[in-house]
Image: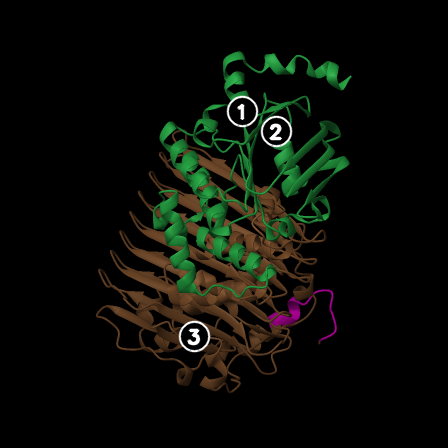
Amino acid sequence: MLSIKNLQASVEGKPILKGIDLEVKAGEVHAIMGPNGSGKSTLANVLAGRDGYEVTGGSVTYQGKDLLALKPEERAREGVFLAFQYPVEVPGVSNIYLLKAALNAIRKHRGLSELDAMDFLTLVRERLKLVEMKEEFLYRAVNEGFSGGEKKRNEILQMAILEPALALLDETDSGLDIDALKIVANGVNALRSPERAMIVVTHYQRLLNYIVPDRVHVLAHGKIVKSGDKSLALELEKQGYAWVTEDAPRASA
Amino acid sequence: MTAPVSDSRPLYLDAINAQRAALPGQTVPAIRTLREEGQARFAELGFPTARLEDWKYTNVSAIAGQLFKPVNGALATVSSEQLHSHLFADLPAHRLVFVNGRHAPALSSVGKLPAGVIVGSLAEILATRPNIVEPHLGKIAPTGTNGFTALNAALFADGACVHLARGAVAEQPIYIVYVSTGDTDSVMTTPRNLVVLEESAQATVIEQYLALDDARYLTNVVTEAALGANSRLEQYRLQQESTKSYHIGTWYVRQARDSRFISHTVDLGGLLARNDLHDILGAEGAECEFNGLYVVDGRSHVDNHTCVDHAKPRGTSREYYKGVLDGMARAVFNGRVVVHPDAQQTDAQQMNNNLLLSRNAEVDTKPQLEIYADDVKCSHGATVGQLDTDALFYLRSRAVDEQTARDLLTYAFANDVLSRMKLAAIRLPLEQRLTTRLLRGRSLNELELI
């Protein structure tokens, strides 16, 4: 589904990603771990198409298409979804308006008709249960005045409604207490399917107790320095990042 | 169009002399004096120039350079069908309609008024009950703050007069409509409105300025409002003049103890609009809230000057103005707050946010705080900027195309001001207008879910 080859990217002229290679198949959940500043969030943002992240080399092929050539909205319509590390407040635009606009844009792209108001509400109500959110959240401005946990749940709600083929979860666990973390993880797990791939970016192993990955990659200094199965995350928890990252400067030299 | 002249003052003074005898209320001594003062002050001041600090960014030489003939009495005929689509149709209200500055009884509909409430045209009330008008008119607004207010004092012939006796409550809003139509090129109207609320009275007053055709005229309006102790006035002011017109509006409000004044000012039209809103919190515990929105494009110019005079202790003022500018439009915001030595425990907040949609649009925003008391809370903020790039990316990452995302954020920015309006019968049609203007006619049906 996703093939990343030698991806290099800079932010404000500073190289952050220095040659990432990653293959993700449908149905797989990959965890990207790494210390602060290793480039984890940069990778997620580059894949979603955020301005200010300049791709300086390499390629990303998604479902046979050159992902990097697509605008952010085109990527979203093709089934890429980024759950933000810091979900943005959008005063004056209601949650439900955004959900409906997003869902209909995606359906239109797929050649489907727009959902009518009743079917849409039925779908939204059902997905609200998944992330244990009250209906009143729908009528509030997007993320405005939401607590940290509510913002993250709202991201998962959007994901549940938009049903992406490739979900990128950028530090979805940051700032969550254990109860909120469980709710978010349950939401994510409910969305695992053989057609869907997920890339879970996290600093801590804790999230991976709840969202169990098929593969774990450690990112350091802009490169993947180690890959393994879920036991790698446990090993990292025990030994710390120094265990894998101390070789990295030599590797890139 | 009349040929430009270097000083139009003599032309205006001639026009005043020619009209004076025919103006209503000339037999009322206080009214006659007010007009004479106005004429004398105008002779002295003429129109403001950019040399005056208050008019530095708003050039009215296009007005000063010719005679806009004062209209007095010549009524164009307007049918209620013509007017209908311009009005807030779903608004149950006591409606007074003025065509080219003069009361049009056939288009007005003032229903049965509650006890203690008087609503009528100023000319009519001056003729029948001058004692309602005499103690207030020209007493709240100084006659000659500038050439425009002086000219209005010299020439006003009609306007709305609203008077609520002690404890009276006007449940239905009072809806004042100023319509410009017909051969109004180079014509000036000088409406004068008076709103008096005695102790504990409550009213909502709507002023709407609109044009039925695209003429080049001047509206020079002065509204005076006196709020008695514990009274409450909510005012809506909607400027939808023609795209070639000039609108100069001056509002003077004086508030007594524990009174509350809320103002909603919306500028959607006009080639040049200048609003002066001056509120004197003249007794303890008075509160005011000003909400303003201007949406300007083309070569239009909108200038909002506000001034809150905190004269006595424990006054509260809130100002919240937002502007959206496109094309080569220009906007000015000048928010003056004066806290007098007596006015301890004043709480004043002011905010002006502007969104520039084009490189050629320009905003001059200036807070002006003058604080002479020591125990006060005063804050102000002003921003001039573009759309939030994070919000833009967020919407795009949710499959919304870039143009729609931009329009949606612009709409949300502006609609924030409208959302403060309590009257849905005004808010919803204005939202609809904003949709047409900022969402390029795209449907916001989804919002009906809210």
Image coords of residue B152 (percent x, y): 52, 66
Residue at mark 3 to residue at mark 2: CA–CA distance: 81 Å
Front-most of A230 and B250?
Answer: A230
- Of all chains, the one bearing label 2 is A
Q: Nearer the viewer, mark 3 or mark 2?
A: 2
Query: Residue A226: where, in percent of width, then height?
Result: 64, 21
Q: Gap between marks 3 and 1, in whole Å?
A: 83 Å
Q: What chain does badge 3 belong to?
A: B
Residue type indicated by callout 3 = Gln
Q: Report the residue marked by disc 1.
A: A203
- Number of numbered tags placed on the structure image: 3
Q: Label 2 is placed on what type of residue? A: Lys
Q: Is residue B6 magenta?
A: yes
* The one of B25 and B68 positioned closer to us in this rendering: B68
Pick whichever, B226 or B130, lies toward us.
B226
Is residue B214 on the magenta stretch?
A: no
Q: Hey, what amino acid is under mark 1?
A: His
Q: Residues within 10 Å of mark 3 (few under 14, many from 20)?
A: some
Quickly name the residue at label 3. B26
* Shade of chain A as shown in the rendered figure: green
Residue A61 visible in image: yes
Give me the disc on residue A40: 2
Q: In this view, does B44 lie to the left or right of A132?
A: right
Q: Is mark 1 on a helix, strand or loop?
A: loop
Chain B in the picture: what colour? Answer: brown
Magenta stretch, residue numbers: B2-13
Q: In this view, does B375 lie above or below A225?
A: below
